[in-house]
Amino acid sequence: MVVRVLAIETSCDETAAAVVDDGAHIRSNVVASQIDLHRRYGGVFPELASRAHLEAIAAVVDQAMREANASWPSLSAVAVTKGPGLPGSLVVGVNMAKGICLARSLPLIGVNHLEGHIYAHWLQPSGWAGSIVRRLEALGSPFPLLALIVSGGHTELVLMHDHGRHELLGHTVDDAVGEAFDKVARMLGLGYPGGPAIQQAAQAGDPHRFPFSRPRISLSPKTARVPHEALLFSFSGAKTHALHLIREHHGDANGKPTHRTPVNDIAASFQEAVTNWLVEKTVLAAEMHKVKAVLVGGGVSANQALRQKLTAQLGAAVSFPPLELCTDNAAMIAAAGYFAFMRGVRDDLSLDVAPDLKLGL
Amino acid sequence: MSATLLAIDTCTRRSSIALRNEHTLLGEITWEAQREETARVSARIEELLRASHVSTAELAAIAVAIGPGSFTGVRCGLAIAKGMALAQGLPLIGVTAFDVLAYAQPCHHLPMLVVLEAGRSRAAICRYDWIEDVPHVADTWRIVPWEELVAELEAAAPTWVCGEVAPHVWARLPAHIRAAPPAWNLRRAGFLADLAFNRWSRGEVDDVMTLTAIYPPEA
């Protein structure tokens, strides 16, 4: 019998719903993006995001059910992102899910958004041979696995010992990597979202013109919960360095670039440094824990330089899902929800949003 | 069993839910929600359904208060209402929190000012006039600091004031202003259910896909 999960994801600026069978087969995967809404702010404006989620949510869920050709009684459970994320945005998705569960007497499963990014690798969309985890599973246990989650809100290295057993190995001590891309893109006048904008500018630039010094990060009371300082990330220094480069190279009185500022070279050098740090620490963690594979997720995993460098270092042991499953989507929440459901995880109707939820601590 | 309507109002700290059918208010829970206590609403709806011996399959319509109020509170109620309406294919009826309070007041033919907490020492206010014994919105609602509200009322004609007036403001209302007694000031979902039931009977329902909250103009 098919286990069919309807999933809802509203943790940041995408209103998403999906119907997935057996944690693998995507029947529908609907994402309503708010990129246009937030472009003028150069980042996500939380109150606007919450409003847009409420306006879109019913139509997005309805579309996911229709495209899946799924009836309400055919559902086995509803999974929803409970955190981490923007509180006001999470409230919309969680309460929508609760309304559906209440009306249909369905089990409710609150999912950690970061776990969703990892479980994107268990999905088997048509046109994709499938992630390395499915091939490893065919041979026995795929664990331990290492996940690198890189997005506008996250930069995490997570060791996965088994389904539902995670250990946080590394995280950023300041900005998330995607946030740094957004901020540097805004400084350089390249627009929003910053990841694709920087990547495009970098193609015409010299990545070795401006060396970025490696951040020195040490364990502090705030970071001491991770086992090794070598696996911590920091991106605020790179952001500040980019600002100095603009000022030093014909920036105007407000620190904005002029036509003489080498925007493409700054973008390329920034991207070169940041992707190098991500790759070095990921490879180090993979070696330290002798993992069978490295699973990459989050919007920044769309970055071509990052993909090429990780593939060069890790070869067939690194896995990237198709782009639409790297960025925020609900199919990955359905996959994570499915595995939790099969382990017997259930939430009751008092499930609350958890904006600061961690994974593996 | 006749058609049952569920009413949900989580606009401000005073949250309320109710069930009614054609002739009877079957049950109502009204509580003072603590800050960020939105997590409890769904569980309380389940509790009310159980206590009223109503199954979700018996629900025929959902009513929801669409604000103004706490942004998160309003969106919480609307999201639950949308989820239930979508999953059961039920009509959804949105009503402002002002209308719920105005509808609950006794007919006294005085101009009426309905007040809701708006946070940061401010009130959201809406004026109503009585036309053929029914309150009608007389003016666009707006946000005013409490101090300004007191000054406005000092200069106003005799007015019936009801709703969530801050405790320190009640005592300062001028003598010609009639303050509603406490029971009239509590926004109860039983009245929301009545209003929505009437609209539903007239075929006035909202679109589950597009119904959204009302926000102050400056926000």
Image: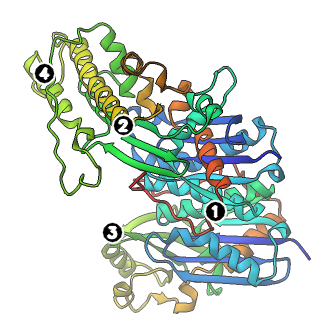
**Sooner in the amino-acid sequence: mark 4 or mark 2:** 2
Query: Alpha-carbon distance for marks 1 and 2?
Result: 34 Å
Q: Residue A34, relative to residue A61: is it above or below?
A: above
The amino acid marked with disc number 1 is Arg
Indicate the secondary structure of the residue bearing disc 2. loop
Q: Quadrant of the N terminus of chain B?
A: bottom right
Q: State which mark lies toward you, 1 or 3.
A: 1
Query: Alpha-carbon distance for marks 4 and 2?
Result: 22 Å
The amino acid marked with disc number 3 is Arg
**Sooner in the amino-acid sequence: mark 1 or mark 2:** 2
Question: Can marks 1 and 2 be said to lie on one chain?
Answer: yes
Q: Which residue is mark 3?
A: B120
Instruction: Identify the residue at horizontal 81%, vertical 81% (top origin).
Output: B53
The amino acid marked with disc number 4 is Leu
Q: State which mark lies toward you, 2 or 3.
A: 2
Q: Which mark is residue A43?
A: 2
Q: Which residue is mark 4?
A: A245
Q: Nearer the viewer, residue B135 or A287?
A: A287
Q: Which residue is mark 1?
A: A346
Q: State which mark lies toward you, 1 or 2.
A: 1
Q: Quadrant of residue A225?
A: bottom left
